[in-house]
Image: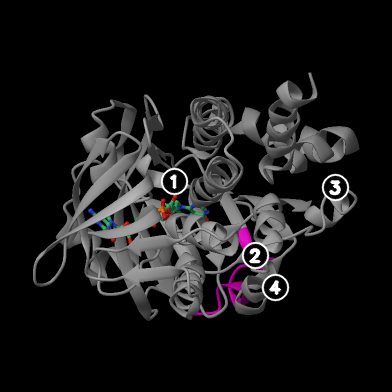
Protein backbone atom coordinates (compact mmCIF):
# COMPACT_ATOMS: atom_id res chain seq x y z
CA UNK A 1 0.00 0.00 0.00
CA UNK A 2 1.19 3.52 -0.83
CA UNK A 3 2.18 5.59 2.26
CA UNK A 4 2.44 9.28 2.92
CA UNK A 5 2.16 11.79 5.75
CA UNK A 6 -0.85 13.71 4.46
CA UNK A 7 -3.40 13.09 1.70
CA UNK A 8 -5.02 16.33 0.54
CA UNK A 9 -8.21 15.93 -1.49
CA UNK A 10 -8.94 18.68 -4.05
CA UNK A 11 -6.49 20.75 -6.12
CA UNK A 12 -8.46 24.00 -5.80
CA UNK A 13 -6.68 27.02 -4.31
CA UNK A 14 -7.22 25.80 -0.74
CA UNK A 15 -6.05 22.20 -1.23
CA UNK A 16 -3.15 23.44 -3.35
CA UNK A 17 -1.97 25.82 -0.63
CA UNK A 18 -2.35 23.19 2.12
CA UNK A 19 -0.34 20.63 0.12
CA UNK A 20 2.31 23.19 -0.80
CA UNK A 21 2.68 24.39 2.81
CA UNK A 22 3.14 20.83 4.07
CA UNK A 23 5.62 19.91 1.32
CA UNK A 24 7.58 23.13 1.92
CA UNK A 25 7.82 22.17 5.59
CA UNK A 26 9.26 18.75 4.85
CA UNK A 27 6.24 16.43 4.98
CA UNK A 28 5.34 13.87 2.32
CA UNK A 29 2.11 14.86 0.62
CA UNK A 30 -0.21 13.37 -1.99
CA UNK A 31 -2.67 15.82 -3.57
CA UNK A 32 -5.52 14.08 -5.35
CA UNK A 33 -7.88 15.79 -7.78
CA UNK A 34 -10.93 14.27 -9.47
CA UNK A 35 -10.59 16.47 -12.56
CA UNK A 36 -7.98 16.01 -15.30
CA UNK A 37 -6.49 19.40 -14.32
CA UNK A 38 -7.25 22.24 -11.87
CA UNK A 39 -10.76 23.45 -12.71
CA UNK A 40 -10.72 26.59 -14.87
CA UNK A 41 -13.94 28.08 -13.58
CA UNK A 42 -15.03 31.62 -12.87
CA UNK A 43 -14.99 31.97 -9.15
CA UNK A 44 -12.69 33.75 -6.74
CA UNK A 45 -10.72 36.63 -8.17
CA UNK A 46 -9.95 38.76 -5.10
CA UNK A 47 -6.99 38.08 -2.82
CA UNK A 48 -7.03 40.24 0.32
CA UNK A 49 -3.94 41.68 2.10
CA UNK A 50 -3.71 39.09 4.94
CA UNK A 51 -3.88 36.28 2.39
CA UNK A 52 -1.06 37.89 0.42
CA UNK A 53 0.94 38.10 3.67
CA UNK A 54 0.40 34.38 4.26
CA UNK A 55 1.26 33.47 0.67
CA UNK A 56 4.39 35.58 1.02
CA UNK A 57 5.71 33.22 3.71
CA UNK A 58 5.71 30.50 1.02
CA UNK A 59 7.21 32.76 -1.65
CA UNK A 60 3.86 32.76 -3.49
CA UNK A 61 2.73 36.40 -3.12
CA UNK A 62 4.99 37.84 -5.81
CA UNK A 63 4.10 35.23 -8.46
CA UNK A 64 0.42 35.96 -7.79
CA UNK A 65 1.00 39.72 -7.97
CA UNK A 66 2.81 39.18 -11.28
CA UNK A 67 -0.16 37.22 -12.70
CA UNK A 68 -2.86 39.57 -11.37
CA UNK A 69 -4.00 43.14 -11.26
CA UNK A 70 -3.20 45.38 -8.27
CA UNK A 71 -6.40 46.99 -7.01
CA UNK A 72 -5.85 49.39 -4.10
CA UNK A 73 -9.19 51.14 -4.65
CA UNK A 74 -12.73 49.79 -4.63
CA UNK A 75 -16.07 51.54 -4.87
CA UNK A 76 -19.56 51.33 -3.47
CA UNK A 77 -21.60 52.89 -6.25
CA UNK A 78 -25.13 54.12 -6.76
CA UNK A 79 -26.32 52.63 -10.00
CA UNK A 80 -28.85 55.31 -10.98
CA UNK A 81 -26.83 58.44 -10.20
CA UNK A 82 -23.29 57.12 -10.79
CA UNK A 83 -22.33 58.54 -7.35
CA UNK A 84 -19.55 56.51 -5.75
CA UNK A 85 -17.91 56.11 -2.36
CA UNK A 86 -14.25 55.27 -2.76
CA UNK A 87 -12.16 53.12 -0.42
CA UNK A 88 -8.40 53.18 -0.82
CA UNK A 89 -6.36 50.46 0.89
CA UNK A 90 -3.39 52.83 0.57
CA UNK A 91 -4.88 54.58 3.63
CA UNK A 92 -4.02 51.53 5.77
CA UNK A 93 -0.54 50.99 4.33
CA UNK A 94 0.78 51.14 7.92
CA UNK A 95 -1.22 47.97 8.73
CA UNK A 96 -0.03 45.66 5.95
CA UNK A 97 2.85 45.01 3.61
CA UNK A 98 0.28 44.60 0.81
CA UNK A 99 -2.13 47.58 0.86
CA UNK A 100 -4.13 46.39 -2.14
CA UNK A 101 -6.26 43.52 -3.40
CA UNK A 102 -4.90 41.30 -6.11
CA UNK A 103 -7.46 40.55 -8.78
CA UNK A 104 -6.53 37.21 -10.33
CA UNK A 105 -8.65 34.19 -11.24
CA UNK A 106 -8.17 31.48 -8.58
CA UNK A 107 -7.21 28.81 -11.11
CA UNK A 108 -3.96 30.64 -11.95
CA UNK A 109 -2.83 30.10 -8.35
CA UNK A 110 -4.14 26.51 -8.22
CA UNK A 111 -2.28 25.60 -11.43
CA UNK A 112 0.95 27.23 -10.31
CA UNK A 113 0.81 25.33 -7.00
CA UNK A 114 0.11 22.02 -8.75
CA UNK A 115 3.11 22.59 -11.06
CA UNK A 116 5.38 23.40 -8.13
CA UNK A 117 4.19 20.33 -6.22
CA UNK A 118 4.83 18.14 -9.26
CA UNK A 119 8.44 19.33 -9.21
CA UNK A 120 8.91 18.64 -5.46
CA UNK A 121 10.51 15.36 -4.40
CA UNK A 122 8.25 14.89 -1.38
CA UNK A 123 4.96 15.66 -3.15
CA UNK A 124 2.81 13.94 -5.72
CA UNK A 125 -0.20 15.33 -7.63
CA UNK A 126 -2.65 12.74 -8.93
CA UNK A 127 -5.17 14.17 -11.41
CA UNK A 128 -8.20 12.11 -12.51
CA UNK A 129 -8.14 10.50 -9.03
CA UNK A 130 -11.38 10.67 -7.06
CA UNK A 131 -11.66 10.23 -3.30
CA UNK A 132 -14.22 7.53 -2.54
CA UNK A 133 -13.88 6.83 1.15
CA UNK A 134 -11.60 6.49 4.17
CA UNK A 135 -11.29 4.46 7.34
CA UNK A 136 -9.41 5.47 10.47
CA UNK A 137 -7.28 2.64 11.89
CA UNK A 138 -5.31 3.46 15.04
CA UNK A 139 -2.96 6.28 14.17
CA UNK A 140 -3.52 6.02 10.40
CA UNK A 141 -6.14 6.98 7.84
CA UNK A 142 -6.57 4.63 4.87
CA UNK A 143 -7.99 6.45 1.82
CA UNK A 144 -9.74 4.68 -1.06
CA UNK A 145 -9.24 6.48 -4.32
CA UNK A 146 -10.68 5.75 -7.75
CA UNK A 147 -8.06 6.06 -10.50
CA UNK A 148 -8.86 5.86 -14.24
CA UNK A 149 -8.09 2.11 -14.08
CA UNK A 150 -8.54 0.81 -10.54
CA UNK A 151 -9.03 1.59 -6.84
CA UNK A 152 -5.91 2.79 -5.06
CA UNK A 153 -5.40 2.70 -1.29
CA UNK A 154 -3.15 5.27 0.38
CA UNK A 155 -2.26 5.10 4.07
CA UNK A 156 -1.60 8.50 5.66
CA UNK A 157 -1.06 10.07 9.06
CA UNK A 158 -3.72 12.69 8.25
CA UNK A 159 -6.37 13.37 5.62
CA UNK A 160 -7.41 16.89 4.60
CA UNK A 161 -10.65 17.34 2.66
CA UNK A 162 -10.37 20.47 0.50
CA UNK A 163 -12.82 19.01 -1.96
CA UNK A 164 -15.21 21.93 -2.28
CA UNK A 165 -18.89 22.54 -1.66
CA UNK A 166 -20.00 18.96 -2.32
CA UNK A 167 -17.14 17.53 -0.27
CA UNK A 168 -17.25 13.77 -0.02
CA UNK A 169 -14.88 13.97 2.97
CA UNK A 170 -17.41 16.15 4.85
CA UNK A 171 -20.22 13.75 3.93
CA UNK A 172 -18.17 10.77 5.10
CA UNK A 173 -17.47 12.56 8.39
CA UNK A 174 -21.24 12.67 8.77
CA UNK A 175 -21.35 16.25 10.03
CA UNK A 176 -24.31 18.54 9.41
CA UNK A 177 -23.82 21.41 6.96
CA UNK A 178 -25.97 23.97 8.68
CA UNK A 179 -27.26 27.18 7.12
CA UNK A 180 -29.38 28.31 4.20
CA UNK A 181 -29.42 28.76 0.44
CA UNK A 182 -30.42 32.09 -1.16
CA UNK A 183 -33.60 31.63 -3.21
CA UNK A 184 -32.30 33.46 -6.29
CA UNK A 185 -29.47 32.29 -8.51
CA UNK A 186 -26.56 34.51 -9.50
CA UNK A 187 -25.34 35.04 -13.04
CA UNK A 188 -21.72 35.89 -13.86
CA UNK A 189 -20.93 37.23 -17.33
CA UNK A 190 -17.48 38.15 -18.60
CA UNK A 191 -16.68 40.59 -21.37
CA UNK A 192 -13.67 42.30 -22.91
CA UNK A 193 -15.88 45.34 -23.59
CA UNK A 194 -14.12 48.26 -21.78
CA UNK A 195 -16.81 49.02 -19.21
CA UNK A 196 -14.71 51.92 -17.93
CA UNK A 197 -15.36 53.68 -21.25
CA UNK A 198 -19.10 53.62 -20.52
CA UNK A 199 -19.17 54.13 -16.76
CA UNK A 200 -16.98 57.05 -15.66
CA UNK A 201 -14.53 56.62 -12.75
CA UNK A 202 -14.96 52.87 -12.48
CA UNK A 203 -12.61 51.18 -9.96
CA UNK A 204 -11.27 47.64 -10.54
CA UNK A 205 -13.81 46.40 -7.93
CA UNK A 206 -17.29 47.97 -7.73
CA UNK A 207 -20.24 47.00 -5.55
CA UNK A 208 -23.16 48.69 -7.26
CA UNK A 209 -26.25 49.31 -5.20
CA UNK A 210 -29.71 49.78 -6.68
CA UNK A 211 -33.26 49.27 -5.36
CA UNK A 212 -34.14 47.30 -8.51
CA UNK A 213 -31.00 45.36 -9.51
CA UNK A 214 -27.70 45.51 -7.63
CA UNK A 215 -24.54 44.17 -9.28
CA UNK A 216 -20.81 43.64 -8.84
CA UNK A 217 -18.32 44.75 -11.49
CA UNK A 218 -14.88 43.20 -11.13
CA UNK A 219 -11.86 43.62 -13.28
CA UNK A 220 -9.40 40.74 -13.77
CA UNK A 221 -6.32 41.23 -15.98
CA UNK A 222 -7.99 40.40 -19.29
CA UNK A 223 -11.74 40.82 -18.69
CA UNK A 224 -14.54 42.51 -16.78
CA UNK A 225 -16.81 40.25 -14.74
CA UNK A 226 -20.42 41.29 -14.18
CA UNK A 227 -22.30 39.52 -11.38
CA UNK A 228 -26.07 40.02 -11.15
CA UNK A 229 -28.83 38.35 -9.13
CA UNK A 230 -31.59 36.70 -11.16
CA UNK A 231 -35.32 36.37 -10.68
CA UNK A 232 -36.49 33.30 -8.76
CA UNK A 233 -37.94 30.84 -11.26
CA UNK A 234 -35.90 32.01 -14.30
CA UNK A 235 -34.64 28.85 -15.99
CA UNK A 236 -30.97 28.27 -16.76
CA UNK A 237 -31.48 28.21 -20.53
CA UNK A 238 -32.95 31.72 -20.40
CA UNK A 239 -30.21 32.95 -18.05
CA UNK A 240 -27.54 31.81 -20.51
CA UNK A 241 -29.41 33.23 -23.55
CA UNK A 242 -28.45 36.22 -25.70
CA UNK A 243 -31.73 37.83 -24.64
CA UNK A 244 -30.65 37.84 -20.97
CA UNK A 245 -27.14 39.03 -21.83
CA UNK A 246 -28.58 41.88 -23.92
CA UNK A 247 -30.93 42.84 -21.09
CA UNK A 248 -28.02 43.00 -18.59
CA UNK A 249 -25.65 45.03 -20.79
CA UNK A 250 -28.42 47.17 -22.28
CA UNK A 251 -29.37 48.29 -18.77
CA UNK A 252 -25.78 48.57 -17.60
CA UNK A 253 -24.08 50.51 -20.43
CA UNK A 254 -26.83 51.12 -23.00
CA UNK A 255 -25.15 48.69 -25.41
CA UNK A 256 -26.78 45.25 -25.51
CA UNK A 257 -24.52 43.83 -28.25
CA UNK A 258 -21.33 43.08 -26.36
CA UNK A 259 -19.28 39.94 -26.71
CA UNK A 260 -19.28 37.68 -23.65
CA UNK A 261 -16.76 34.93 -22.93
CA UNK A 262 -18.49 33.13 -20.05
CA UNK A 263 -22.07 32.92 -18.80
CA UNK A 264 -22.07 31.06 -15.50
CA UNK A 265 -24.95 30.45 -13.08
CA UNK A 266 -24.41 29.93 -9.34
CA UNK A 267 -26.49 28.91 -6.39
CA UNK A 268 -25.26 30.74 -3.33
CA UNK A 269 -25.27 29.32 0.19
CA UNK A 270 -24.42 30.36 3.74
CA UNK A 271 -23.42 27.11 5.40
CA UNK A 272 -20.95 25.94 8.04
CA UNK A 273 -20.11 22.32 8.86
CA UNK A 274 -20.88 21.52 12.49
CA UNK A 275 -17.31 20.29 12.99
CA UNK A 276 -14.20 20.77 10.83
CA UNK A 277 -12.49 17.67 12.20
CA UNK A 278 -12.99 14.04 13.10
CA UNK A 279 -9.98 12.18 14.52
CA UNK A 280 -7.18 12.47 11.95
CA UNK A 281 -9.44 13.93 9.26
CA UNK A 282 -9.99 17.68 8.76
CA UNK A 283 -11.95 19.75 6.26
CA UNK A 284 -11.01 23.23 5.06
CA UNK A 285 -12.22 25.77 2.49
CA UNK A 286 -15.56 25.30 0.77
CA UNK A 287 -15.70 21.74 2.10
CA UNK A 288 -16.16 23.27 5.56
CA UNK A 289 -18.02 26.54 4.87
CA UNK A 290 -19.81 28.43 2.12
CA UNK A 291 -20.76 32.08 1.86
CA UNK A 292 -22.00 34.58 -0.70
CA UNK A 293 -19.29 36.29 -2.80
CA UNK A 294 -19.92 39.85 -1.53
CA UNK A 295 -16.62 40.94 -0.08
CA UNK A 296 -14.58 38.13 -1.60
CA UNK A 297 -14.08 36.10 1.59
CA UNK A 298 -14.72 32.45 0.58
CA UNK A 299 -11.41 31.39 -0.90
CA UNK A 300 -9.49 33.81 1.30
CA UNK A 301 -10.92 32.29 4.48
CA UNK A 302 -10.26 28.79 3.08
CA UNK A 303 -6.60 29.72 2.62
CA UNK A 304 -6.64 31.05 6.19
CA UNK A 305 -7.96 27.62 7.32
CA UNK A 306 -4.96 26.00 5.61
CA UNK A 307 -2.57 28.38 7.34
CA UNK A 308 -4.14 27.51 10.71
CA UNK A 309 -4.22 23.71 10.20
CA UNK A 310 -0.96 23.00 8.38
CA UNK A 311 1.51 24.41 10.95
CA UNK A 312 -0.29 22.27 13.55
CA UNK A 313 0.13 19.11 11.43
CA UNK A 314 3.82 19.94 10.98
CA UNK A 315 4.19 20.41 14.76
CA UNK A 316 2.44 17.09 15.46
CA UNK A 317 4.41 15.07 12.92
CA UNK A 318 7.82 16.70 13.26
CA UNK A 319 7.94 17.79 16.91
CA UNK A 320 5.54 15.35 18.57
CA UNK A 321 3.13 18.13 19.60
CA UNK A 322 -0.14 16.87 21.15
CA UNK A 323 -2.59 16.00 18.36
CA UNK A 324 -5.87 16.21 20.28
CA UNK A 325 -5.07 19.65 21.64
CA UNK A 326 -3.87 21.11 18.34
CA UNK A 327 -6.62 19.70 16.14
CA UNK A 328 -9.19 20.72 18.75
CA UNK A 329 -7.76 24.25 18.61
CA UNK A 330 -7.92 24.24 14.81
CA UNK A 331 -11.57 23.24 14.90
CA UNK A 332 -12.53 25.77 17.53
CA UNK A 333 -10.51 28.68 16.10
CA UNK A 334 -11.56 28.28 12.49
CA UNK A 335 -15.17 27.49 13.36
CA UNK A 336 -15.42 30.65 15.44
CA UNK A 337 -13.71 32.80 12.81
CA UNK A 338 -16.03 31.44 10.11
CA UNK A 339 -19.20 32.06 12.11
CA UNK A 340 -18.33 35.33 13.75
CA UNK A 341 -16.60 37.06 10.87
CA UNK A 342 -17.01 35.42 7.44
CA UNK A 343 -20.65 34.39 7.78
CA UNK A 344 -21.75 37.50 9.69
CA UNK A 345 -19.95 39.96 7.38
CA UNK A 346 -21.01 38.36 4.07
CA UNK A 347 -24.64 38.23 5.22
CA UNK A 348 -24.38 41.91 6.23
CA UNK A 349 -22.76 42.80 2.88
CA UNK A 350 -25.57 41.06 1.01
CA UNK A 351 -28.23 42.84 3.07
CA UNK A 352 -26.52 46.13 2.41
CA UNK A 353 -26.36 45.83 -1.36
CA UNK A 354 -29.63 43.99 -1.93
CA UNK A 355 -32.51 45.82 -3.46
CA UNK A 356 -35.02 47.12 -0.94
CA UNK A 357 -37.59 49.84 -1.05
CA UNK A 358 -36.52 53.38 -1.88
CA UNK A 359 -36.47 54.46 1.78
CA UNK A 360 -34.19 51.58 2.84
CA UNK A 361 -31.98 52.43 -0.08
CA UNK A 362 -31.82 56.12 0.94
CA UNK A 363 -30.82 55.12 4.47
CA UNK A 364 -28.07 52.82 3.17
CA UNK A 365 -26.71 55.60 0.99
CA UNK A 366 -26.73 58.02 3.93
CA UNK A 367 -24.87 55.45 6.04
CA UNK A 368 -22.18 55.01 3.40
CA UNK A 369 -21.83 58.80 3.00
CA UNK A 370 -21.41 59.22 6.79
CA UNK A 371 -18.87 56.39 6.92
CA UNK A 372 -16.67 57.75 4.17
CA UNK A 373 -16.60 61.26 5.60
CA UNK A 374 -15.40 60.07 9.04
CA UNK A 375 -11.68 59.12 8.87
CA UNK A 376 -11.81 56.80 11.93
CA UNK A 377 -14.92 55.00 10.68
CA UNK A 378 -13.47 54.70 7.17
CA UNK A 379 -10.25 53.20 8.53
CA UNK A 380 -12.19 50.71 10.67
CA UNK A 381 -14.25 49.76 7.63
CA UNK A 382 -11.14 49.26 5.47
CA UNK A 383 -9.51 47.10 8.15
CA UNK A 384 -12.66 45.01 8.48
CA UNK A 385 -13.49 44.51 4.80
CA UNK A 386 -9.85 43.71 3.95
CA UNK A 387 -9.97 40.91 6.59
CA UNK A 388 -7.01 42.49 8.44
CA UNK A 389 -8.98 43.14 11.64
CA UNK A 390 -10.41 39.63 11.94
CA UNK A 391 -7.16 37.85 11.04
CA UNK A 392 -5.24 39.99 13.51
CA UNK A 393 -7.79 39.40 16.29
CA UNK A 394 -7.72 35.65 15.60
CA UNK A 395 -3.90 35.60 15.71
CA UNK A 396 -3.92 37.41 19.06
CA UNK A 397 -6.48 34.99 20.46
CA UNK A 398 -4.56 31.97 19.18
CA UNK A 399 -1.35 33.24 20.78
CA UNK A 400 -3.00 33.67 24.20
CA UNK A 401 -2.96 30.09 25.58
CA UNK A 402 0.70 29.70 24.63
CA UNK A 403 1.56 32.91 26.46
CA UNK A 404 -0.48 31.97 29.56
C1 LIG B 1 -19.12 34.01 -8.48
C2 LIG B 1 -18.19 33.72 -7.35
C3 LIG B 1 -17.19 34.65 -7.04
C4 LIG B 1 -16.34 34.41 -5.97
N1 LIG B 1 -15.40 35.34 -5.69
C5 LIG B 1 -14.58 35.16 -4.63
C6 LIG B 1 -13.54 36.10 -4.35
O1 LIG B 1 -13.34 37.07 -5.08
N2 LIG B 1 -12.74 35.86 -3.28
C7 LIG B 1 -12.91 34.76 -2.48
O2 LIG B 1 -12.18 34.62 -1.49
N3 LIG B 1 -13.85 33.82 -2.76
C8 LIG B 1 -14.68 33.98 -3.81
N4 LIG B 1 -15.59 33.03 -4.13
C9 LIG B 1 -15.60 31.75 -3.39
C10 LIG B 1 -14.48 30.83 -3.89
O3 LIG B 1 -14.62 30.57 -5.27
C11 LIG B 1 -14.44 29.51 -3.13
O4 LIG B 1 -14.49 29.79 -1.76
C12 LIG B 1 -13.15 28.73 -3.46
O5 LIG B 1 -13.20 28.23 -4.77
C13 LIG B 1 -12.96 27.55 -2.50
O6 LIG B 1 -11.80 26.87 -2.85
P1 LIG B 1 -11.61 25.35 -2.44
O7 LIG B 1 -10.21 25.01 -2.88
O8 LIG B 1 -12.03 25.14 -1.05
O9 LIG B 1 -12.69 24.56 -3.32
P2 LIG B 1 -12.81 24.40 -4.89
O10 LIG B 1 -12.19 25.56 -5.59
O11 LIG B 1 -14.22 24.08 -5.16
O12 LIG B 1 -11.90 23.12 -5.21
C14 LIG B 1 -12.29 21.82 -4.82
C15 LIG B 1 -11.57 20.81 -5.72
O13 LIG B 1 -11.84 19.51 -5.21
C16 LIG B 1 -12.05 18.63 -6.30
N5 LIG B 1 -12.85 17.47 -5.83
C17 LIG B 1 -14.14 17.48 -5.45
N6 LIG B 1 -14.52 16.25 -5.04
C18 LIG B 1 -13.42 15.46 -5.16
C19 LIG B 1 -13.17 14.08 -4.88
N7 LIG B 1 -14.11 13.25 -4.37
N8 LIG B 1 -11.92 13.58 -5.13
C20 LIG B 1 -10.93 14.39 -5.61
N9 LIG B 1 -11.13 15.69 -5.89
C21 LIG B 1 -12.35 16.24 -5.66
C22 LIG B 1 -12.79 19.49 -7.32
O14 LIG B 1 -12.67 18.96 -8.63
C23 LIG B 1 -12.06 20.84 -7.15
O15 LIG B 1 -10.96 20.96 -8.02
C24 LIG B 1 -16.46 33.22 -5.21
C25 LIG B 1 -17.44 32.27 -5.53
C26 LIG B 1 -18.30 32.52 -6.59
C27 LIG B 1 -19.33 31.50 -6.92
Q: CA distance from mark 3 to mark 1?
A: 26 Å
* Main SS, magenta residues: loop
Q: Is residue 201 magenta?
A: yes
Instruction: Answer with mark 3 or mark 1, whichever residue precedes in sequence.
Output: 3
Q: Secondary structure at mark 2?
A: strand
CB contact under 8 Å: marks 2 and 1: no
Q: Is residue 334 magenta?
A: no
Placement of 364 over or under 259, stated as above or below: above
CB contact under 8 Å: marks 4 and 3: no
In the visual, does 182 lie left or right of 295? Answer: left
The circle drawn on residue 102 is 2
Label count reads: 4
Q: How many residues crowd around disc 4 within 10 Å: few (fewer than 14), some, or many (20 or more)?
A: few
Looking at the image, which residue is at 22% across and 65% down? 129
The boundaries of the magenta stretch are 193-205
Q: Which residue is mark 1?
A: 285
Observer-nearest residue: 154 or 268?
154
Q: Which residue is mark 4?
A: 62
Instruction: Answer with mark 2 or mark 3, whichever residue precedes in sequence.
Output: 3
Q: CA distance from mark 2 to mark 4?
A: 10 Å
**Residue 32 position in % (x across, y down):** 31, 62
Placement of 268 over or under 103, stated as above or below: above
Q: CA distance from mark 4 to mark 3?
A: 19 Å
In the visual, does 252 lie left or right of 151? Answer: right
Instruction: Answer with mark 4 or mark 3, whichever residue precedes in sequence.
Output: 4
State yes or no: Cβ of the residue under disc 1 lies below 8 Å from any atom of ligand 1.
yes
Amino acid sequence: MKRTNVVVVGAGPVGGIAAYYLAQHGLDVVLIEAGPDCAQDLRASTFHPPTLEMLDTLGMAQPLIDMGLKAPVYHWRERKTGEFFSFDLGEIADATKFPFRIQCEQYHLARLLARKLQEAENAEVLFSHRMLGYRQQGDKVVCSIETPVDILEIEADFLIGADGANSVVRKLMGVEFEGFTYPEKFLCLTTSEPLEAHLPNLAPVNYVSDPEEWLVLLRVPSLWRVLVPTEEGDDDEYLRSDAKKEEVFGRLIGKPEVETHHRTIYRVHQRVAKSFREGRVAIIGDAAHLNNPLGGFGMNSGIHDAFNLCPKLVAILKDGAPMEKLLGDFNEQRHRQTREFVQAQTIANMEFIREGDAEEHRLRRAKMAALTSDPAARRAYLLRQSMIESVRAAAEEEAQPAAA
